[in-house]
Image (cartoon, helix red, strand yellow):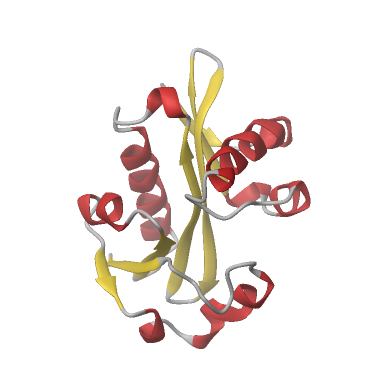
Amino acid sequence: MLIRKAKISDVEDIHSLINHYAAEGQMLARARTTLYEGIREFSVVEIDGKLVAAGSLHVLWSDLAEIRALAVAPEYIRQGLGKRLVQAFLDEARELELPQVFALTYKPEFFMKCGFRLIKKEDLPQKVWKECVNCPQFPNCEESAMIIDL
């Protein structure tokens, strides 16, 4: 197993993985354009040369980052890959000297197992919501807000 920063050649696999879960209503879809523009934020898990998990760490400000688009291929679920990817993002956030990382998720139990705690969405700073206005779920978001102090 290898955790590495994503490359341009990974975009199609990341797109397929994320949008598989989006089709099931378990996460928000991502356009290829968004993935290409944000490729430097993404990390992937590779097993035997196959991309099996992906996600991104998006820095919002000097004190806050978000874990986004975290997805593990269905055949690799419950093998600890998602948790290892989250740990890699938390390590990266520590290196960047960020004091907090949050996630908006339909799977709060997973993030609790990674050390995050549930908070009210309203407790997140206003800058978090700048992209929400473009979301098909806005303003009726059913995601849970989770945060961890580093």
Task: Give left or right: position of 98 versus 57.
Answer: left
Name the residue at 46% across, 66% down.
Answer: 65
2 vs 103: above or below:
above
Residue 21 in percent (x, y) is at 53, 42
Name the residue at 51% across, 52% down.
Answer: 27
Task: Give left or right: position of 39 versus 107.
Answer: right
46 vs 42: above or below:
above
104 vs 19: above or below:
below
Residue 14 occupies which quadrant of the picture? top right
For the N terminus, give its image quadrant.
Answer: top left
Tag count in the figure? 0
Residue 22 in percent (x, y) is at 57, 47
**What is the residue that sits farthest to the top in this orientation?**
48
Residue 31 seen in render:
yes
For the C terminus, give its image quadrant.
Answer: bottom left
Name the residue at 31% across, 41% down.
Answer: 83
Residue 47 in percent (x, y) is at 46, 18
Residue 7 seen in render:
no
68 vs 48: above or below:
below
**What is the residue that sits farthest to the right in this orientation?**
33
Q: Looking at the image, which is closer to me, 138 or 131?
A: 138
Name the residue at 54% across, 61% down.
Answer: 58
Q: Looking at the image, which is closer to me, 13 or 135?
A: 135
